[in-house]
Image (tube, rainbow, N blue to C red):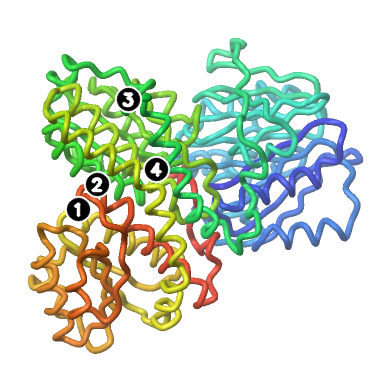
Amino acid sequence: MCGIVGYIGNQKAAPILIDGLSKLEYRGYDSAGVAIYDEGSVKVRKYKGRISILEENLKKETIKGNIGIGHTRWATHGEPSDRNSHPHTNYSGNIALIHNGIIENYMKLKEWLISVKGDHFKSETDSEVIAHLIDYFYEGDLLDAVYKAIEKMEGAYAIGVICKDEPDKIVAVRKDSPLIVGLGENENFIASDIPALLKYTKDIYLIENEEVVLLTKDEVKIFNEFREVVKRDVFKVTWNAEAAEKEGYPHFMMKEINEQPKGVYDTLHRRLDKKDNIVLDGIKITKEDLEQINKVYIVACGTAYHAGLVGKYAIEKFAKIPVEVDVASEFRYRDPFVDENTLFIAVSQSGETLDTLAALREAKRKGARILSIVNVVGSSVARESDDVFYTWAGPEIAVASTKAYTTQLVSMYLIALHMAVTKGSIANDQYKKYIKALKEMPDQIQKIVENEESIQKIADEQFNNENVFYIGRGVDVAVAYEGSLKLKEISYIHSEAIGAGELKHGTIALIEEGRLVVALATQDGLYDKMLSNIQEVRARGAYVIGVAKEENKEIEKVADKVIYIPDTLDEFTPILSVVPLQVLAYYIAVARGCDVDKPKNLAKSVTVE
């Protein structure tokens, strides 16, 4: 969740660290800091708040050093404050450390360190323990001390360490938290994610779990847990820094909403041959394999979980295989029935979501086949899977996911249809009808986006509501969950999604005069029932915004406002109906003066459990 950056080379470290951290702001943070070796000492500057505060304070003094580490913190242990910010140091200040993750046995280690070295701790964090632990083992060899320290540590971590007594190196370690190394000429880098380094290099080492890295300005050595040198191919980044810039949009979120037609087009057409046959290069599931599969689990978190709910609908409808969707953070703790006849589908935008990764490993341990849907090539989830479906959303910077979600939906539909064709559970004419509808999606999304002004007007009228309900039936319920999440995460409005048929079993007690209800009515087979549910809430004073297909005008008689989506097959409406909900959430948040791209308390990549 935190952002880490490190630099060693011939340039001044401070500007590079600040620039790298600013490219990681999307990960979410509440404080920022750097540690730089300069003039014979490690100088630490760290402050609660935005990176701009750190940057302004650094401008007040000259730090010329060319080796340093930087960090943006998302608080877990200890409140956001200057002293709890990273980097952390040992008592003498000659060792400085940045850490992403959680040390689960930190209290035990802290108590032991206090008993043998005295209480020299300055913060409430688990991370500071690592600095003191490395100091305890330090005898002139930083790499050796780090190895000895991590033998004692339990939990998840990506760390970067510098030492006053060895000012020509950075030591970094990865265990269950993302870490990459950037390769330059007479300079090298570490970071949590690629955008931090794109300005300086496109040559990357993807660091594997439990690997330790030793960086100097001229060399990078990767070691495994046994201290053996590991050979690693260079990963060439194919996208540029401009792809991670706003390009004139007021926020990344709006830019990414507008990029959905391209993302959906690329994700779809890269998987279709000239005859519109689905070709899944990274997935080798045969008819025999499918006949052995008796259950599918789709496991994910947040927005990806909502995509999984649509995936369940698609796989069960097209491929006729039972599917269970689980929240990743709960999957491991209920002893799920998984064996060698289970297909486990992990969905993660970043491919580094720790809960999803842990669930994947549990399923793999029990013999399941692992198929992942991810947006980041070379990510941990992708590397640990048997089969991988890469979405082609491009870099997504805003914390609230938009284009990653719609490309995940397309991925789910393609996987489901591929399974159906492989099994023979779908007729050819029906398959062609589905592919034709999917190929219309990019232009149909574009049409919705171009209608944003009318959605903005609705947002400007309704932004003061503090409690909102999203309702739907069938697959619309999954979209209701996603629409509700978008609203709450960027506008801080309390929002709840519920199946419309469940309203009368309790929730309708909360409907009162002026209560805003967003009602999805895109399923032809459930349309009349949905109109009845809208009438139920209208009768109790609700203000209803309906979402329906252009051909279904009857909704205008029961809803206060209607947002129309282009006509399509019921099966594929989620790809379209979510877009106006994204736009609505965006403009409500803007009207409330919220920080749309970096909502409070949230992080883009959740790498703690």
Mark 2 or 4 closer to N-term?
2
Q: 607 left or right of 219?
A: left
Label 3 sits on residue: 275
Label 4 sits on residue: 407
Q: Nearer the viewer, mark 3 or mark 4?
A: 3
Distance from label 1 to label 4 (Cα)? 17 Å
Q: 500 left or right of 469?
A: left
Mark 3 or 2 closer to N-term?
3
In the image shown, does 285 or 430 lie closer to the viewer? 430
In the image shown, does 491 or 12 lie closer to the viewer? 491
Mark carried by residue 310: 2
Mark 3 or 1 closer to N-term?
3
The amino acid type of the residue labelled 2 equals Val
Distance from label 3 to label 2 (Cα)? 26 Å
Q: Indicate the quadrant containing the C terminus: top left, top right, bottom left or bottom right.
A: top left
Do tag 3 and tag 1 residues touch (Cβ < 8 Å)? no
The amino acid type of the residue labelled 1 equals Val
Residue drawn 62% across the image and 11% down it = 229
Residue drawn 28% across the image and 44% down it = 437
Mark 1: give few (<14), some (14-19) or many (20+) Cα within 10 Å: many
- Residue 144 occupies quadrant: top right
Q: Position of residue 127 (x, y in %)?
A: 57, 44
Q: Position of residue 401 (x, y in %)?
A: 44, 52
The amino acid type of the residue labelled 3 equals Lys
Mark 3 or 4 closer to N-term?
3
Label 1 sits on residue: 475
- Residue 439 occupies quadrant: top left
Distance from label 3 to label 1 (Cα)? 29 Å
Q: How many marks?
A: 4
* Residue 497 visible from this viewpoint: no
Mark 3: give few (<14), some (14-19) or many (20+) Cα within 10 Å: few
